[in-house]
Image: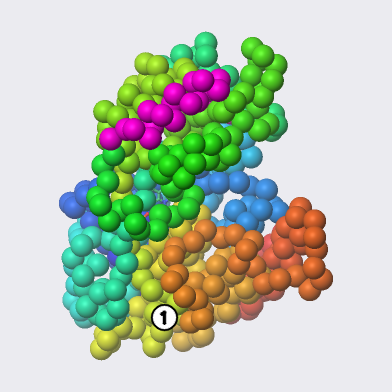
C-alpha cells in the first residue's frame, strides 16, 4: 500500500489526508501543535480557522460561491463538516470554529488509514526514507526550521511578510441598545450587529485611530500587505474616508433613529453558534492591545467591550509557485534536489490565500497523489473552473512577483463574446465553470478517482 507523509494538519493537510484515505492511500499526518505553537493558532485541533470564522459567500455567480460548488461536487470532507457547523451570516458560510475543528480532528483520528502524529518536521530527508511521497501543507506559519530547510532545498527565497487579524469582542459586553441588528439590503436580515457613526463620531474615531500606537516592525510598512487583509489603520492612513468606502461603508443600511443611511458603520458578525462573541468585520489591525481597547471602544455600542481576542500580526510563508510548482501541485521536476521521493505542496504554502482555497488545494493535491499512486498522470483541471483559474495563474512561469491569492473572476480566461454587464458576465463564468467541472468530474470517474454517483 502506498504510504504518504503529509506535513501540517491545517485546512489543506486535513482535507488531503481524508481524501487520500478515502482512496485507499495510507497517510501519516504530522502536526507540530501543541508541541510547538504558531503565533496565531490557539488550539491543538486540526483545521483551526485562525482569524475570521467566515468561509465567504455562497452565491453561484461569485468566485467564492463557484469555489464552494466545486468543493461540494468533489465531495470535500471539510466543506461538508463546515456546513454541519454553520452559523447565521447572511449570504455567507460561517462556522462555529471550535465545533468545526473538533469534528475534523475526530474524523482524522477515527480514520484507520490516517496516523496523526504530533511532531514538528524540520527536515525532509528522514521522511523520504520512510514514505513513498511527501505533501507539504504547513501554511503561512510554517515553522522556521522547515522554512529554512525549504530554502536550502529549493535554492530560492521562501518569502515572508506580515498580515493582520481582526479583534473579537464578547457579546455580553456590548451595548445592545445602541447596536442595530441588520444585514445590508436586508438580505438574510438580522445576521449582523451594526454600530452606526455620526459624522463627528467618525472623524473623532479616525483621529484616534491614526494617532494610536502600533506594533509595527519598521520594514513592515514597506512590505506588500495582502489587500483584503489590510489593517484598518493602514486603510485610514491611505485616506480618512477610505474606511467609509470599504469596511465601514454604510450602503444598504438604515439607522432606525433617523430613518436614513448612517455616515459610517462597523459590522459585527457572530463567531459561534451561541452568539457569545462577535468579530469586528474587516478590522484587522496591529495596534497595541491597550490601544485596540481604547480606540475601538470609541465605536458606538462598544464603549465597554471586552476583547476575547485582540487583532494580531502574523507571518506569511509561501513558495515561488510560478517557478516551483506544476498545475497538479507537484514540484516541477517531481521533487526537490536529490530527494528520492515525489513532493507536492498544498494550501497557502503553495500560494493560495483563503480558507476554502486551502481546502480545495488539499483536495486537488490528494487527487494528484492518488493518480500517481495508481501509476497514472493527474487529470488536468480546466482553467475555466474557479480553482483551475487560480492554479493556472499561480503556476504559470509567465507570472511575475506572485503573491498568494484568492479565487477571483479577474483570473478567469475571457468569455468568447465580450459581455459588458457585470452580473451577466459573472453568470456566464459560473455556467461555463459548471460545464467544465462536469467534464473534469467525468474524467476523474473514468480514472477511478471519483465515485460515479449522480453528480448535479
Ligand atoms: P494552516 O491552516 O495554517 O495549516 C498549517 C498547519 O501546519 C498548522 O496546523 C501548523 O501548526 C502546521 N505546521 C507548520 N509547520 C509545521 C512543521 N514544521 N511540522 C509540522 N506541522 C507544521 N483566510 C481566510 O479565508 N479568511 C481569513 O480571515 C484569514 N485570516 C488569516 C489570518 C491569519 C493570522 C493568517 C495567518 C492567515 C489567514 N488567512 C485567512 C489565510 C489562510 O486562509 C489560512 O491561513 C489557512 O488556514 C491556510 O491553510 P493551510 O492549510 O495552508 O495552513
Crowd band around label 1 with a 10 angstrom C-alpha radius: few (<14), some (14–19), many (20+): some
Magenta residues, start to end: 191-213
Q: Percent position (x, y) of residue 270?
A: 49, 30
Q: Quadrant of residue 142?
A: bottom left
* Membership of 66 in magenta stretch: no
| Residue 46 seen from this side | yes
How many discs appear?
1
- Left or right, 444 with reference to 371: right
Percent coordinates x, y for residue 256 in the rendering? 66, 15
What is the quadrant of the N terminus in the image?
bottom left
The quadrant holding residue 208 is top left
Task: Name the quadrant where ligand 1 sits.
Answer: bottom left
Query: Which quadrant is the C terminus positioned in?
Result: bottom right
In this rendering, does residue 309 appear at all?
no
Above or below 433: residue 42: above
SS for callout 1: helix
Q: Nearer the viewer, residue 298 or 238?
A: 238
Left or right: residue 430 compared with residue 268? right
In this rendering, is residue 188 above or below 97? above
Q: Residue at x 25, y 88 (%)?
A: 338
Give the residue displayed 57% in from the left and 28% down from the top.
264
Would you identify the image quadrant in which residue 159 lies?
bottom left
Q: Is residue 295 above or below residue 396?
A: above
**Residue 66's x, y, as percent?**
64, 57
Q: Is residue 100 above or below residue 19?
A: above
Q: Position of residue 255 (x, y in %)?
A: 64, 19
Please report the residue visible at 68 percent of the width from the left and 31 percent of the height from the top. 252
The residue tagged 1 is: 323
Of residues 180 and 79, which is closer to you in this image? 180
Colouring scheme applied when the structure was drawn: rainbow
Q: Residue at x 20, y 59 (%)?
A: 119
Amino acid at each position: 500500500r502506498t504510504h504518504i507523509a503529509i506535513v501540517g494538519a491545517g485546512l489543506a493537510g486535513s482535507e488531503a489526508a481524508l481524501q487520500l484515505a478515502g482512496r485507499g492511500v495510507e497517510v501519516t499526518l504530522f502536526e507540530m501543535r501543541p508541541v510547538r505553537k504558531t503565533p496565531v493558532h490557539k488550539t491543538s485541533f486540526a483545521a483551526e480557522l485562525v482569524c475570521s470564522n467566515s468561509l465567504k459567500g455562497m452565491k453561484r455567480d461569485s468566485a467564492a460561491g463557484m469555489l464552494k460548488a466545486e468543493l461540494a461536487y468533489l465531495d470535500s470532507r471539510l466543506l461538508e463538516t463546515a456546513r454541519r457547523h454553520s452559523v447565521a451570516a447572511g449570504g455567507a458560510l460561517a462556522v462555529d470554529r471550535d465545533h468545526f475543528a473538533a469534528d475534523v480532528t475526530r474524523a482524522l483520528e477515527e480514520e484507520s488509514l490516517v496516523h496523526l502524529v504530533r511532531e514538528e518536521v524540520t527536515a525532509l530527508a528522514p521522511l523520504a526514507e520512510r514514505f513513498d511521497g511527501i505533501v507539504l501543507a504547513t501554511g503561512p506559519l510554517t515553522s522556521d526550521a522547515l522554512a529554512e530547510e525549504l530554502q536550502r532545498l529549493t535554492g530560492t527565497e521562501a518569502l515572508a511578510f506580515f498580515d493582520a487579524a481582526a479583534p473579537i469582542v464578547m457579546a455580553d459586553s456590548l451595548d445592545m441598545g445602541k447596536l442595530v441588528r441588520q444585514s445590508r439590503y436586508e438580505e438574510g436580515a438580522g445576521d449582523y450587529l451594526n454600530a452606526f457613526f455620526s459624522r463627528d463620531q467618525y472623524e473623532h474615531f479616525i483621529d484616534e485611530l491614526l494617532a494610536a500606537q502600533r506594533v509595527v516592525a519598521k520594514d513592515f510598512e514597506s512590505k506588500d500587505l495582502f489587500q483584503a487583509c489590510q489593517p484598518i489603520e493602514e486603510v485610514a492612513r491611505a485616506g480618512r474616508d477610505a474606511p467609509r468606502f470599504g469596511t465601514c461603508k454604510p450602503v444598504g443600511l438604515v439607522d432606525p433613529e433617523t430613518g436614513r443611511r448612517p455616515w459610517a458603520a462597523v459590522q459585527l458578525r457572530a463567531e459561534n453558534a451561541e452568539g457569545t462573541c462577535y468579530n469586528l468585520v474587516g478590522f484587522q489591525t496591529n495596534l497595541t492591545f491597550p490601544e485596540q481597547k481604547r480606540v475601538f471602544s470609541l465605536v458606538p455600542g462598544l464603549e465597554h467591550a471586552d476583547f476575547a481576542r485582540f487583532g494580531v500580526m502574523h507571518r506569511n510563508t509561501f513558495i515561488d509557485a510560478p517557478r516551483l510548482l506544476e498545475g497538479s501541485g507537484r514540484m516541477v521536476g517531481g521533487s526537490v534536489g536529490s530527494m528520492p521521493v515525489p513532493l507536492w505542496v498544498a494550501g497557502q504554502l503553495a500560494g493560495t490565500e483563503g480558507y476554502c482555497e486551502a481546502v480545495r488545494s488539499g483536495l486537488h493535491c490528494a487527487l494528484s497523489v492518488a493518480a500517481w499512486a495508481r501509476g497514472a498522470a493527474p487529470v488536468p483541471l480546466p482553467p475555466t473552473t474557479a480553482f483551475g483559474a487560480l492554479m493556472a495563474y499561480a503556476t504559470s512561469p509567465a507570472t511575475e512577483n506572485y503573491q498568494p491569492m484568492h479565487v477571483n473572476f479577474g483570473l478567469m480566461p475571457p468569455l468568447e463574446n465580450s459581455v459588458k454587464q457585470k452580473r451577466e458576465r459573472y453568470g456566464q463564468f459560473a455556467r461555463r465553470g459548471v460545464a467544465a467541472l462536469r467534464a473534469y468530474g467525468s474524467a476523474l470517474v473514468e480514472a477511478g478517482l471519483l465515485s460515479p454517483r449522480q453528480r448535479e
